[in-house]
Amino acid sequence: MFTTMNSPWAPIPPPPGTPAQYGYPPAYHPVQVRQTFAAAPLHYVPVAQPPPQPRPVPAPPAEKKKIDWPGPVRLYVQRSFQSENLLEDVSRDDMEKKLKETIAAASDNNTLDTVDWDNLLLPQQMIHQERAQAKAMAWKQESLEMRIGTNGHANSNHAVSVSKKRKSQDIGGDDTSMPPWRTNNRIEDRITDKRQQPFQEEKLSKSQRNLEKRLRRFDGGYKSSYARSPSPEPSSGPVVGTCQILEKQYFRLTSAPVPSQVRPEPILRQTLDLLKKKWKKEGNYSYICDQFKSMRQDLTVQRIKNEFTVTVYEIHARIALEKGDLGEYNQCQTQLRALYTQNLGGNPVEFKAYRILYFIHTSNRTALNDVLADLTTAEKEEKAIKHALGVRSALALGNYHRFFRLYLDTPNMGAYLMDMFVVRERLVALSNICKAYKPDIKLRFITEELGFESDGDAAQFICDYNGQHLLEEKNDELRFLTGKAGALFETARSAAFAKVDIKGQI
């Protein structure tokens, strides 16, 4: 029998709950054995719930306050339902809905008193315009989808045919595009190593793949697919308008014009009469300019070029001159120059004179020489053109005395153009006066020579350029110290010629 010391097995520990019989403590903590499988009871203190509070009684709904609509809003509603303003394709329910939306939007934005209700489009006109725009967008989307659908197939076939043609030309032999001096002694003929052939084929296939990619990307982009499209093909001729609305807001065209949104010539003539009355009565240039641009657009899309077209452009040009809008004026004069070549009537002499003054203002000597070269002998004897040529001659010679005499006697509306460059010419003349007259001169002399209306205007002009200290009162008259003003006005003269605003020049 083996002893414990010689046994390879470790001694067996005593059973749980039995005190240890060895000299070391047990490696566990004794716990109480559960006698049942029931869950231990939870001990908690019940929380007393507060009594339910009574629900608040809802306040009675506030009575709607009666809105006192402004007078222009009431007149706008009345005009909307007048028989002569009703449209057959717009129902009364749609009108009322649109009218409520318009007035509600103005009321929410607190703009009831600021909206121009007299010139605002009527609700039926708004609906008519929205429908036309929706139709135009739908037509554009449909044509775009058809173009995308057909171009994919056409381009792939075209790419294959072109690639085949390219391959036959490069590999197969005769290249008819080769110049005569390259037909013999080509470097390809001198290469006899057959090991070069795989490299050439690999290079050729790569160039073909690049060519096909370019064709798929660009080729066919300018080809029209309307012939295969079920949608109607847009006419290549002019649009014939059917819109009967006199006043229409200007929108830049982003798609083909829709006839229902274009006014025919009889309606445009009525619109022109209305705009002339409104301009004399109200003088709202923003509105008038927008309406004239809309008229010009309708004339352009219908390709109407007659005496009425010339009249529209001339009136718009004169109004733009009066308000100093050189951008719109220059657009009108550019079109008028082309219309006058077709002998459609109008006032070509008047606007040729304006054109000369305009190029003097913009310091465009090249264009000015072109205008002078086109003048006939008879045109040079016309009063307006003769005046414009005199202005050019006076400035070229530095004769400021004659220039300001011509400025005070400008025919037609040329004074509006001369007002745009008279300030810089006054600076030039004043700089020369400071060199020629020293030490001082009467302020009255400045007033008469530089075309001022009064001595006060002349003094204000000097003060605008920080020349207050150059005015002194001597012997009961105001004098200008020219000896001390030379450097000041020479600097101002150089700055005036540094930059010319030619906004809108084409």
Image: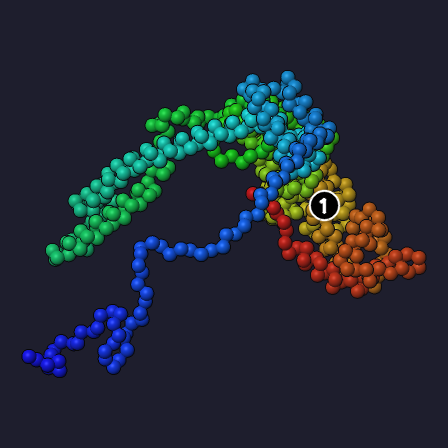
**What is the crowding at mark 1: few (fewer than 14 residues within 10 Å), some, or many (at least 20)?**
few
Residue at x-position 36% and y-position 31%: 146
Q: Quadrant of the C terminus?
A: top right
Rendering quarter of residue 233:
top left
Identify the secondary structure beneath mark 1: loop
Choose between 186 and 413: the one closer to the eye: 413
Image location (x, y in percent) of residue 290? 62, 35
Give the left or right position of residue 8, taking residue 97 as reference.
left
**Residue ID for mark 1:** 419
Q: Quadrant of the N terminus?
A: bottom left
What residue type is disc 1 on? Asp
Query: In this rendering, is residue 87 above or below 436?
Result: above
Residue at x-position 84% and y-position 59%: 471
Image location (x, y in percent) of residue 199? 17, 55
Give the left or right position of residue 34, taking residue 504 as reference.
left
Q: Is residue 153 visible?
A: yes
